[in-house]
Image (tube, rainbow, N blue to C red):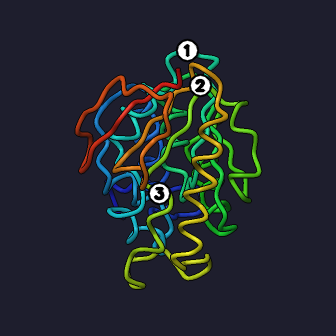
Amino acid sequence: MTQGLNLSADGNLEDDARAASVSRIANALRAGAEVSDSAFDALLPRRYRWPSQRHWTPVVACRDAAAWLAPEPDSRVLDVGSGIGKLCVIGSLATAATFVGIEQRPHLVTAARALASLLDANTASFLCGDAFALDWREYSGLYFYNPFAEPLFPEPMRIDSTLDHSEAGHDLAVKRLLDKLVGLRRGTRLVVYHDLGCALPDGFERIEEKVSGHSSLELWIRN
């Protein structure tokens, strides 16, 4: 007789252990307790773990960014280039605000939705499409993790090859970004992690800056 093993109804120990880990991580994020990136990233499909250090925001930076972006329960935050959904999911669990991620890659949107469902991050949702087609004025805060730098990386360091990785595409994205920022409402909060890839236009004031995770986090407000 085997003792000390907590078998599920179908005898699947691995599923029981994963469910316990998911519950611990979700509860810790809600309570403000420490969660390592390795523990969080273990919830992701294996194909999405390797980009974590370069492309997904660290847990601690997600928490800091969410606190800046969502000072009120009715805050509504847009993550431009949301990737695997880490910022939105953690923000949803750590605050009472609503987080929306917009991402061009359908497979990443699918994975982000699955992650939100897994952790019961009910105020996180994800859209697939062109971020510039949205009305950013509907949001009280926007988050950017150097969203247009990927084309500048060597090919092995990119998430995949599904997007336009040309310099011309990068330059056009930056131009469209600046056009959108100029039109934001007064009081809109911008949080930038690891640089935006260009200077902000006139009319933005930097309120706070700190090192969070492995890079710099900045809070700007539209005047």
Q: What label sits on residue 72 in the rendered view?
A: 1
Label 2 crowd (10 A; few <14 / some 14-19 / many >=20): many
Give the structural element (helix, strand or loop) at label 3. Answer: loop
Of the pair 179 and 121, the residue shown nearer to us = 179
What is the distance, in whole Å, between disc 1 and disc 2 at their CAs?
7 Å
| As drawn, 66 above or below 35 | above
| As drawn, 206 above or below 62 | above
Q: Nearer the viewer, mark 1 or mark 3?
A: 1
Q: Mark 2 belongs to which amino acid? A: Ala
Q: Mark 1 belongs to which amino acid? A: Glu
Whether label 1 touches label 3, CB < 8 Å: no
Give the structural element (helix, strand or loop) at label 2. Answer: loop
- Identify which residue is drawn at 64% across, 47% down: 117
Q: Which residue is mark 3?
A: 7
- Identify which residue is drawn at 60% across, 33% down: 77
Q: Mark 3 belongs to which amino acid? A: Leu
